[in-house]
Amino acid sequence: MSNRWKPDLKWSDVTPKPLWLNRRQIMTGAAALAAAPLAGPARAQLAAAPSQYSTDEAPNSLEDITAYNNFYEFGTGKEDPSRYADGLTIDPWSVVIDGLVDKPGTYDFADLVKDQPLEERIYRFRCVEAWSMIVPWVGFELAGLLNRVGVQPGAKFVAFETLVRPDEMPGQKSPFIEWPYREGLRLDEAMHPLTIMATGLYDAPIPRQNGAPIRLIVPWKYGFKSIKSIVRISLVDTMPPTTWNMLQPSEYGFYANVNPTVDHPRWSQASERRVGSGLFGGRQDTLMFNGYEAEVASLYAGQDLSVDY
Ligand code: MTE
């Protein structure tokens, strides 16, 4: 069962650390440095601890992860983000945290991540377009940040927004999305230990095309929930509007849990193509909740997931 996530299996159980370091050096090397020079908010994340939450599957290459992207602020083509994201200013960067919190404010990136324990999380990533990757993120649990700012009792959802800066994000000159890109989670989903804020990829700061300097990762949901380049986090009491649901509510619900038994109206979600596995290989069955069923199914007890899709 090598493609199942094993919650009781530690990274150190599968790969001795020296080997892990060597492999990492081989896989990233110069490419990682070129993709993400160490500057500014970048001061990320080179000493992240491995995590018990990681899958034991082999990660995709840095090239797969940074050259085949969805980031509509830079265009709708898969290569547009890697082509056009270079011009995005990520230093300075700040995030507004507001709504039902004890300590609302505008947090500088460095202050936001200060004291949050960084871990490497090797996660399955399943896009709603039925492709997938294995990605070694570096980040910290969103719960840690929310606890630090103090969630008030009335808060039921967390809303996220991406930067709006059409001068640097050419895709924003097209109004087909009502910018900013928006996403949301129910509070219990946001507080789940699998939900992280990523600031790094492999051993370097997260590249711009992947959502620098900080993005959300919710591994049991379709990739579109994992909003990039976040500038606002709001604690709210009603279900917030989300970009894909606003665009096409019959195709994209609020929950967007990976679910092989609920097809997209225009295609099956039962299987997926693993990016980087070649033309003829790599098609595999999609797992319920993207393989994280044991951890998250209880969040949805009593819900009809064909209605709450
Ligand atoms: N976040 C923003 N701000 N804009 C986007 O267009 N695309 C989403 C998500 N986050 C998107 C976004 C979609 S559809 C996917 S599949 C993932 O980002 C892709 O993440 P990746 O490029 O790092 O693989």
Image (spheres, grey):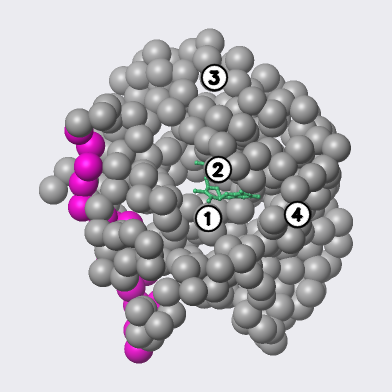
Residue 70 tag number: 2
Q: Which residue is mark 1?
A: 224
Image quarter of the C terminus: bottom left
Task: Work out how far the residue at label 3 is from the one at label 4, CA to CA, in angstroms.
Answer: 33 Å
Q: Which image quarter: residue 121? A: top left
Labels 1 and 2: the sequence-earlier one? 2
Classify 244 as above or below 139: below
Task: Work out how far the residue at label 1 is from the one at label 4, CA to CA, in angstroms.
Answer: 18 Å
Image x and y of residue 290, in percent: 32, 57
Labels 1 and 4: the sequence-earlier one? 4
Q: Is residue 135 visible?
A: yes
The foreground one among 24 and 282 is: 282
Q: Mark 2 Cα within 10 Å, few/some/many (few <14, many 20+)?
A: many
Mark 1: is the Cβ under 8 angstroms from ligand 1? yes
Labels 2 and 4: the sequence-earlier one? 2
Determine whether the residue tagged by mark 2 lies in a helix, strand or loop: loop
Residue 95 lies left or right of residue 16; in this view the side is: right
Labels 1 and 3: the sequence-earlier one? 3
Labels 2 and 3: the sequence-earlier one? 3
Determine whether the residue tagged by mark 1 lies in a helix, strand or loop: helix
Image x and y of residue 180, in percent: 75, 57
Residue 32 tag number: 3
Q: Which residue is mark 4?
A: 175
Task: Work out how far the residue at label 1 is from the one at label 3, CA to CA, in angstroms.
Answer: 24 Å
Residue 260 lies left or right of residue 189; in this view the side is: left
The disc labelled 4 sits on which kind of residue? Pro
Q: Residue at x 29, y 48 (%)?
A: 272
Classify 94 as above or below 102: above
Labels 3 and 4: the sequence-earlier one? 3
The stretch in magenta equals 281-302
Mark 3 or mark 4: which is in front? 4
Residue 135 lies left or right of residue 44; in this view the side is: left
